[in-house]
Image (cartoon, grey):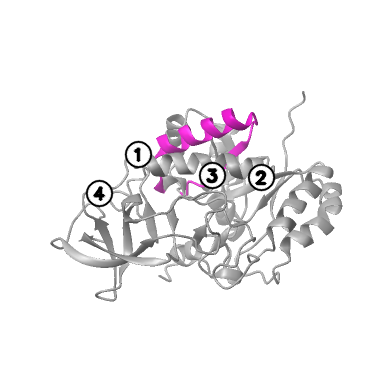
Amino acid sequence: MKKINGIMMQYFEWYMDCKQNLWKDIIEQAELLAKMGITALWLPPAYKGIGGKDEVGYGVYDVYDLGEFEQKGTIKTKYGSKEEYLNCIMALKQNGITSYADIVLNHKMGADMLQTIPATKVDWGNHNAEISNQEIVRVATKFTFPGRKNKYSNFEWNWTHFDGIDYDENSKQNAIFKFKDKDWDESVDEEFGNYDYLMGADIDFKNQEVVEECKKWGKWYVDTTKVDGFRLDAVKHINSAFYLNWIQTIREQTQKELFTVGEYWSTDIGKLHKYIQETQGQISLFDVPLHYHLENASKDENYDMSKILEGTLVKENPAKAVTFVDNHDTQPRTSITKFCNGLV
């Protein structure tokens, strides 16, 4: 079978106002997209988030709610209903376009109840440095999903399934609190000492209950939606061994190839090579160094184009590289753009 150097389109952006009709829009545009040469669509996170109908998808609340249950003030997600999502994926298949689901497993937000537990505050600049004695905090870590009523899964999340969080209801303080008897995950990016913690209630991938539930959900998701692959969010914050085991398990259970690309946001090509090695080549990566080379070339009229591929994944490991110019994280006013421009 001839290999195709396909074109993936990210069919959403951070500030879009789709009026909960994105899935319907894709159905209407599928034939046109195919004629344009698009071979795959990267679809936004399809599950219910903390922001309800306004949630882009990365503030994950319930991964089993694809726009089916009354939760967070809405049945539909920002992009539409579960039925519309499934119809969207089917319409893409009928037009020869594969669909990639955005998978966000690093954290959860919008818990249904608070829990009172011991925790220790750590430094924002060095997550390995504890800066307080153990204290009692009230944190948003109990997820019961009352609107779903245990449909698809009766798993309830509690504080033991997380490593830490960034807000204490007792003190009304924004700080990173590492929970009692917890350690940050290993095999993550070493920025800030250990970059396991990113945001929200940080999922503990050393907890076997968590690992098994994530595998169960992954198989359910593929069986339910019929997606063709995944875009994995924030992989540098998650133990690489977890994702290697997760993707191998889902592929074996579903008997599907499931092309998978991870977002490892770093310009250090060595880190990208290391992650690919740690995941045994099972996961491709976005070529972040190339993105910044393209950006620099667009701003510098004297840019030496003969050097544009130096230190990029597409040059050093093209089989595992997914090239891109921009995405939702690099558009104006988003966090990465602000940070790179020195605005935060």
Dot 4: element: loop
Q: Pointer 3: what residue?
A: 217
Dot 1: element: loop
Quadrant for residue 141, please give it.
Answer: bottom left
Q: Real-space Cα distance between discs 4 and 3? A: 24 Å
Q: Residue furthest top?
A: 1
Q: Real-space Cα distance between discs 1 and 2? A: 31 Å
Q: Residues within 10 Å of mark 4 (few under 14, many from 20)?
A: some
Question: Which label sits in the foreground, 1 or 4?
Answer: 4
Q: Real-space Cα distance between discs 3 and 2? A: 10 Å
Decide: marks 3, 1 in contact (CB < 8 A)?
Answer: no
Amino acid at pointer 2? Thr
In this view, the residue in front, 79 or 304, is 79
Q: Residue at x 81, y 49 (%)?
A: 91
Amino acid at pointer 3? Trp
Where residue 70 appears, as percent x and y from the top left, is: 60, 67
In this view, the residue in front, 307 or 261, is 261
Answer left or right for 158 relative to 335.
Answer: left
Q: Real-space Cα distance between discs 2 and 4? A: 34 Å
Q: Pointer 1: what residue?
A: 187
Quadrant for residue 199, please give it.
Answer: bottom left
Mark closest to the chain's N terminus, 1 or 4: 4
Answer left or right for 56 relative to 5.
Answer: left
Decide: marks 2, 4 in contact (CB < 8 A)?
Answer: no
Can residue 214 be seen at all in this image of the molecule?
yes
Q: Residues within 10 Å of mark 3 (few under 14, many from 20)?
A: some
Q: Residue at x 59, y 57 (%)?
A: 65
Q: Pointer 4: what residue?
A: 182
Where residue 66 appears, as percent x and y from the top left, is: 62, 57
Amino acid at pointer 1? Ser
